[in-house]
Image: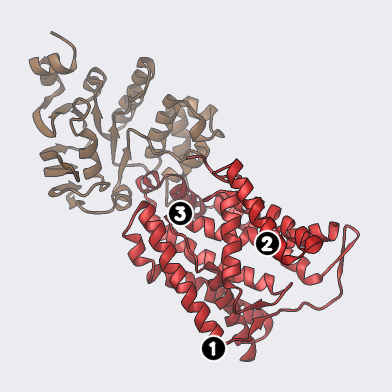
Chain colours: A brown, B red
């Protein structure tokens, strides 16, 4: 479904990721694990067209999307939930969700299914997004991303700034979405949670893919255990 | 005093509409359009010329409004192109310089080609009684039109998908792109819309007082002051500030004269900015 080949990208200071390749198949959950500064965010920004890669290609459903504008990529069916969320702070929960369905009017059933997934949002439907807690904002960001009925949901560190209980809650929701057949790509530092969700994963270190494998393989990999699972 | 306040509301609503247009374009695209008053004046001249060509007042006004919209589109397609390639402060500065240059050119052309023309629209019938005060009918009609348009704009931004999409770009451009909104198209749409609004201000203004070929800079400066006082990027703030400054302006003008009233207006604006740097309803950065 998503095929990334030889992607190199960065900012004026130089390349942050180099020659990165990975793929996500339909119905899979795939994780990119890496510590702070490994290049996870840069990688996703390059995939989503928020950053122009200096080389490499990104294919989505057999269509090359490298260099396309973010809004076009979004309309092809990739929903991105950035770590900073980028909600519309002065709009209500309901308005944020409505815009998720842009350019269509929101389908009431879709709104309801977001509320079923995150009952907390239903209680806060009239509240402005900017006045909500971090956990609620994260739920809203995921909810907004779902409103366009995406084929692929991409999340950059969905647990940033969340208490452990809320982080687990967020992954519970992602598990439900995966069960319903949604393809998920997630970058994460909180590796145990992501491992439980994912079928496969890649380890990104200093902008390069160091390892890849199924979740079971990564769980038993000594380096992964030492660096990301806190097992000595 | 009440008569002055009512006159102030008439003026203030127009200030608000004018400043609302300026602030929307700024909030949406970081573009400061200093040729905004000239857009209003050119539209007014289109109405004048259409009427001289034999069109009735209402069709002529419609032609003027369309011309205003086209001017906005033309701005987007021509001199703003290089502006769009820049970001942040550089973008604001280049847009300011280019539109200021355009404003001078338009002003020069109009005063050379049509030095004495002015748009004056008259509405028949005597004064209207309001709160025990006799108001000029044109002023009342102008205010009613302005209030209806402001209400329409409010509904557009609150209730329609397109209106919400425009707001989304003002609130968080990256978030907007992630849900599939094209910021560049929204900006074009708003430039067209504000062109029509500028034309509408010229038309409603001409119901109260003649709009001359040289009115452009005065309109832009008024809009700019109101925008800054209201808070850049806040349409509600623009309307509120428009009403307050409109009333200050008319009350001061009638009690101490026009020249001093402009100074009082500027002082009021300066004091507001000193107390609240982000403007009345502006968002703190």
Q: Residue B113 has which mark?
A: 1
Label 2: how many residues lie within 10 Å, few (<14), some (14-19) or many (20+)?
some
State if disc 3 and disc 2 touch (CB < 8 Å).
no
Residue positioned 54% across, 27% down in the render:
A123
Identify the residue at horizontal 55%, vertical 60% (top origin). B21
Select label 2 or label 3 by which is in front.
2
Q: Looking at the image, which is closer to me, A231 or A38?
A: A38
Chain designation of label 3: B
Judge if badges 2 and 3 mark residues of a common chain.
Answer: yes
Pinpoint the chain carrying mark 2: B
Would residue B155 be found to the left or right of residue A48 on screen?
A: right
The Cα atoms of the two marked residues, 1 and 3, are separated by 35 Å
Residue B73 can be seen, yes or no? no
Counting residues from the N terminus, which is met first, the one under dot 1 or under dot 2? 1
Where residue A32 appears, x then y in whole percent?
19, 30
**Mark closer to the chain start, 2 or 3:** 3
Q: On the image, numbered disc 3 is attached to which residue?
A: B28
Q: How many marks?
A: 3
Q: Nearer the viewer, residue B170 or A22?
A: B170
User: Which SS class for mark 2?
Assistant: helix
Marks 1 and 3, the one that precedes in the sequence = 3
Residue located at (29% from left, 41% from top): A151
CA distance for labels 2 and 3 = 30 Å
In-front residue for pair A53/A102: A53
Question: Horizontal placement of A224 versus B42: left or right?
Answer: left
How far is disc 1 from disc 2 in space, using C-alphas?
Answer: 29 Å
Query: Which residue is label 2 attached to?
Result: B262
- Residue B81 is situated, as x and y percent measured from the top left of the image, at 35, 66
Relative to residue A223, is residue A124 depicted above or below? Answer: below
Please state if A184 lies on the left or on the right of A25 as rendered.
right
Residue B96 visible, this angle: yes
State the image coordinates of residue B231 (x, y, percent, origin top left). 56, 48
């Amino acid at each position: 479904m998503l095929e990334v080949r030889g992607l190199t990208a960065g900012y004026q200071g130089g390349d942050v990721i180099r020659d990165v390749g990975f793929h996500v198949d339909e119905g899979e959950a795939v994780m990119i694990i890496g510590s702070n500064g490994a290049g996870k965010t840069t990688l996703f920004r390059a995939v989503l067209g928020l950053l122009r890669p200096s080389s490499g290609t990104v294919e989505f459903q057999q269509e090359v999307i490298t260099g396309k504008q973010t809004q076009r990529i979004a309309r092809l069916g990739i929903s991105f939930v950035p770590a900073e969320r980028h909600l519309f702070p002065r709009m209500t929960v309901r308005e944020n969700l409505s815009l998720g369905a842009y350019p269509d009017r929101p389908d009431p059933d879709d709104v309801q299914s977001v509320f079923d997934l995150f009952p907390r949002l239903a209680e806060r439907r009239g509240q402005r997004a900017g006045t909500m807690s971090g956990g609620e904002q994260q739920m809203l960001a995921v909810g907004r991303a779902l409103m366009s009925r995406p084929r692929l949901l991409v999340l950059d560190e969905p647990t940033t700034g969340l208490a452990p209980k809320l982080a687990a809650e967020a992954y519970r929701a992602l598990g439900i979405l995966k069960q319903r057949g949604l393809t998920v790509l997630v970058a994460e530092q909180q590796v145990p949670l992501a491992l439980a969700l994912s079928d496969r994963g890649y380890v990104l270190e200093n902008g390069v893919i160091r390892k890849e494998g199924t979740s079971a393989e990564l769980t038993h990999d000594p380096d992964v255990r030492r660096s990301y699972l806190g097992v000595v | 005093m009440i008569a002055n306040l009512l006159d102030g509301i008439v003026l203030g609503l127009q200030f608000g509409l004018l400043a609302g247009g300026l602030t929307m374009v700024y909030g949406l695209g970081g573009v400061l359009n200093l040729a905004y008053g000239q857009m209003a004046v050119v539209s007014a001249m289109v109405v004048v010329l259409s009427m001289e060509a034999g069109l009735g007042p209402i069709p002529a006004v419609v032609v003027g409004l369309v011309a205003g919209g086209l001017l906005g589109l033309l701005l987007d397609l021509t001199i703003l192109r290089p502006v769009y390639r820049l970001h942040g402060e550089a973008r604001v500065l280049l847009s300011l310089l280019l539109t200021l240059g355009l404003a001078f050119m338009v002003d020069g052309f109009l005063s050379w080609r049509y030095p004495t023309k002015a748009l004056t629209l008259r509405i028949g019938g005597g004064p209207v009684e309001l709160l025990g005060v006799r108001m000029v009918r044109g002023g009342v009609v102008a205010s009613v039109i302005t209030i209806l348009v402001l209400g329409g704009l409010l509904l557009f931004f609150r209730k329609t998908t397109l209106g919400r999409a425009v707001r989304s770009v003002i609130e968080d451009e990256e978030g907007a792109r992630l849900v599939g909104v094209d910021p560049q198209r929204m900006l074009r749409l708003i430039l067209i819309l504000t062109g029509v609004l500028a034309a509408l201000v010229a038309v409603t203004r001409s119901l109260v007082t003649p709009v001359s070929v040289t009115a452009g800079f005065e309109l832009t400066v008024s809009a700019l002051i109101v925008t800054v006082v209201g808070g850049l990027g806040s349409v509600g703030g623009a309307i509120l500030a428009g009403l307050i400054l409109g009333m200050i302006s008319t009350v001061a003008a009638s009690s101490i004269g026009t020249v001093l009233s402009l100074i009082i207006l500027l002082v009021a604006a300066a004091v507001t900015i000193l107390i609240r740097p982000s403007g009345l309803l502006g968002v703190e950065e």
